Image (cartoon, rainbow, N blue to C red):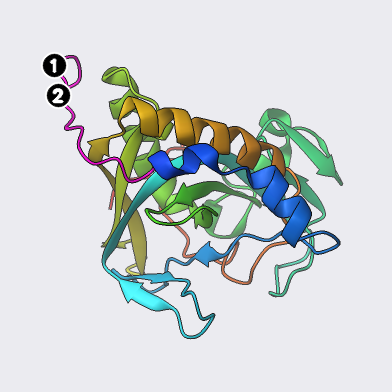
Amino acid sequence: MTQETGIVTTNNAFEELASFNLTDAMSQELEGLSLSFERIKIPSAGSTVFELPTMDGGEPETVKEFTGVILYHHPLFAYYRDKYAGGNEPPDCGSFDGVTGEGDPGGACVKCRYNQFGSGEGGGKACKNRRRIYILREGEVFPVLLSLPTGSLKEFTRYIQRLLSRGKKSLAVVTRFSLKKAVNTGGIAYSQAQFNIERALTEAELAAVSNLAAQVKEYAKHVGGYSVDLDEFVEVPTPFDPATGEIVEP
């Protein structure tokens, strides 16, 4: 146990990544192919199991929790002028950094009328705010992608703040992901992601994953453009405080 953080440090499962170069692997094996990371899905209707991709590409594995290292995470904003009907249609305006929107209307996200509570259905935002998280699981060298819905963003923010208060970044620990059932003020159940520290990485592991994380951050700018999966922007409306715009705890 490390004295400065109180976070247990064991194992060395990620050290083998030290000799792996994602850029070389991509250029050799995926030349001319479109880059796309497999996705972990959060089911609707308050289910407390994740759907994880499998090696054979068959039916997803359902698990109550899993662990992995958060290599990188970033906002993903999308505004559809007409109601999103599914598929992989790009939004009218999107943002990968939550700062500047590209498209119509484009510009500064913080000032955009569609990024204000009350502009969308049920009093929410017309521009849907999510966060993409690139997660590396033990024994793998390619990360998987988890798209957090609005109702889970506050929990994720709290987790990052807890890590920072201990002098740790999300890249420096193995995170345990789970789900809990929540209910909005309209009585509709939805799934809310939960985050906990499993253990801290060893110095050797951190050095290995840091190199990979830098490469993933660069590739993340090109993952599917602003196109999204059917479930990425179709979500249960979550209650909010109209005075502060904060999501109300279920």
Residue 145 among those drawn in magenta = no
Q: Which quadrant is the N terminus positioned in?
A: top left
Question: Which amino acid type corresponds to the residue marked 1 in the rendered image?
Answer: Gln
Residue indicated by mark 2: 6
- Dot 1 falls on a residue whose secondary structure is loop
Q: Which residue of the protein is positioned furthest toward the bottom in this rendering?
A: 59
Residue indicated by mark 1: 3
Camera sees residue 75: yes
Left-right relation of 124 to 193: right
Camera sees residue 72: no
Q: Magenta stretch mostly in which secondary structure?
A: loop
Residue 12 among those drawn in magenta = yes
- Residue at 50%, 31% in the rendered image: 210
Q: Are marks 1 and 2 in contact (CB under 8 Å)?
A: yes
Estimate how packed mark 2 is, as few (under 14), some (14 to 19) or many (20 or more) residues with alpha carbons within 10 Å: few
- Residue at 79%, 67% in the rendered image: 89
In this picture, is 118 found above or below 159?
below
x then y, percent, for residue 19: 53, 40
x then y, percent, for residue 115: 65, 41
Q: Nearer the viewer, residue 160 or 248?
A: 160
**Quarter holding residue 227:** bottom right
Q: CA distance from mark 1 to mark 2?
A: 5 Å
Left-right relation of 125 to 47: right
x then y, percent, for residue 220: 67, 45
Labelled disc at residue 117: none
Estimate how packed mark 1 is, as few (under 14), some (14 to 19) or many (20 or more) residues with alpha carbons within 10 Å: few
Left-right relation of 90 to 173: right
Residue range in magenta is 1-14
Question: Which amino acid type corresponds to the residue marked 2 in the rendered image?
Answer: Gly
